[in-house]
Image (spheres, rainbow, N blue to C red):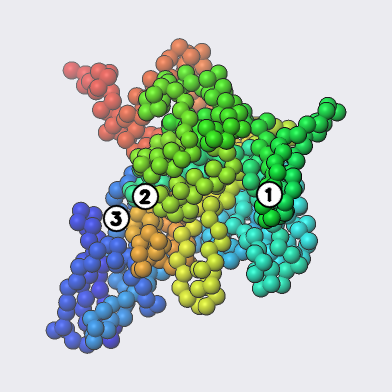
Amino acid sequence: SHSYFAILFSPRCHLFCTIYRHCRSTMASSLRILSSRSILRATSATASRQWSGAVPSSSASSAPISFGMQYVACSTSLANNSTSFRFKSTDTSKESKAKILAPPMVYISGEEMTHYATKLLIEQWIEPHFDTSQWESYDLSCKSRDDTDDQVLADAVDAGKRIGAIFKEPTITPSAIQVQEMGLKKAWGSPNGAMRRGWNGITISRDTIHIDGIELGYKNQVLFERHAVGGEYGAGWNEVGQGTLLTTYIPKDGGAPFVVDKRDLTDSHNVCVVYHNPYDNVRELAHLFFNRCLEHKVTPYIVTKKTVFKWQEGFWATMKKVFDETYKEDFLKAGLLDRSGGDLQHLISDAATMQLIRWTDGGFGMAAHNYDGDMLTDQIAQVHRSPGFITSNLVGKSDDGTLIKEFEASHGTVTDLWNDHLAGKETSLNPLGLVEALLGAMTHAAQLELNAKPKDKEVKNMHAFVNNYTTTLRTALHNTFRYGQGTRDMCGPTGFTTEDFIAKVAWRLNRYLAQQTEEQAPPELKEEDLELPASKLKELDQKALMNLFEKYDKSGEGKIDFKNFSKMLLKMGVAPKKQS
């Protein structure tokens, strides 16, 4: 049998009250009160909803929501008194609008579940608003790399160096088993090493992602800079027997060679490993790290194991020198060294692992070598919730000094969910890390275009639109979680599926953007429109004028209504009085 019910929302009690009226019998009725989260997560293919509401502020964690009463059909089982229904998103904007030409960007696609989810969100979130014809796409799936003998990787690296803004989906570095399963020619290595070398990698920034109104692991942001080159990742190695191992340095300038290390191998089975750490770009890493710490108002720490690994002393010494020469006074003035004794502190990597667990208030940043950074940021991800809640941004430098930035999620391709998807099962992938990466790449691409053409009006408009769009999308995404409509890692087994979540965010994004659109563009203010000449305006305190205007501009729309205008004149004592 079918029922019809009304859904009402009370902002004060945050409960939905559902009133059922059975069609077969007017005598049989029931009243059930469900929590807002439960009713928002319920699913069925026989119902739909459409609601209206105010756009909450991105900074408000408990912004009010206004719902009208809607009637929807549902399927009701009288035998078990259970009701299930699926809410389908509706696009509030039916009219086609002119798309903004997105600036050049490199798009690197991967595979499995993250590729599927990213394709959906590009189709529903990006393409309705942007013309992406200037994006250059490169397929780094295992099959594509195999078919091209990895030429596609070389092409992607060249494009990234030329364009400077890159978004990368998670990719697979095939194991020996996967080589057989996929029928590959060989086990292609991780593309990350080629990218870091090709883009003169300096650091990998990995920061915690936060959602207003939702408690995660760290209350405030945690920043991390991981040296992007050197260490074990580029090591040479071999298995050897008994003998002597010599590591010899041959100077490029023709100087005399000398032995860096000599050791006698007495075991019959040994693994010899040789690697180095390039330190030329540590100064650049330091500047990036300390500037970001100041921007985000966090306390900086440097992490090494220099008490045992004496060769790591140079990393700490360089970071400390840059800090003392350029940044210490700024950090002291901002009060950001209060928790660290008034100076930049060094942490032994062992101690850092403990502090990451203890310092859950956040508000700190760390910088470390490549391998230590890899391990410590994995720990940060687990404390904060999962790898999906931290960013991963490679920062390099082109030959002309322009920063190259590559953005990706810090997690892999999520094979288990992909297998479920292929098996026809429901999946619920949280795309938060993917979205932050995509928005970061789009923002950097827009900034590079503006830097190249600072006076071009169309470029200025594009840059402003991209910044507003990324802020609005982030708000729509976060509010979808806040309203109990998140994926199952956040909302439990009744959370939204991958497809439903992406559709719901698209619906909310379109509604938010539509409410920002002005029916008529504001007029451009020209010199002849001003009652006062420019020479007179220079004599006025324009900042004070603006503050006064904003005080009485209650709507925030850049205008003062008659009521507030009257109040302003009365307050200033200049309101005209009736003539006696």
Judging depth in this view, the residue of 226 and 110 nearest the camera is: 226
Amino acid type, mark 2: Leu
Amino acid type, mark 1: Thr
Disc number lying in front (1 or 2): 1
Q: Does dot 3 land on a helix, a strand or a loop? A: loop
Compared across the picture, whether 428 is left or right of 361 comes to right
- Location of the C terminus by quadrant is top left
Judging depth in this view, the residue of 550 and 519 nearest the camera is: 550
Compared across the picture, whether 351 is left or right of 202 comes to left
**Number of marks present in the image shown:** 3
Callout 1 touching callout 3 (CB < 8 Å): no
> Between disc 2 and disc 3, whose residue precedes?
3
Give me the residue at 50% from left, 68% from top: 417
Q: Residue furthest left?
A: 27
Give me the residue at 54% from left, 35% from top: 308
Residue 115 in the image, given as x and y percentages of width and height:
58, 62
Q: Residue furthest front?
A: 266
Judging depth in this view, the residue of 22 and 182 nearest the camera is: 182
> Between disc 1 and disc 2, whose residue precedes?
2
Amino acid type, mark 3: Ser
Disc number lying in front (2 or 3): 2
Give me the residue at 19% from left, 71% from top: 32
Per the image, the residue denoted by label 1 is 266
Per the image, the residue denoted by label 3 is 66
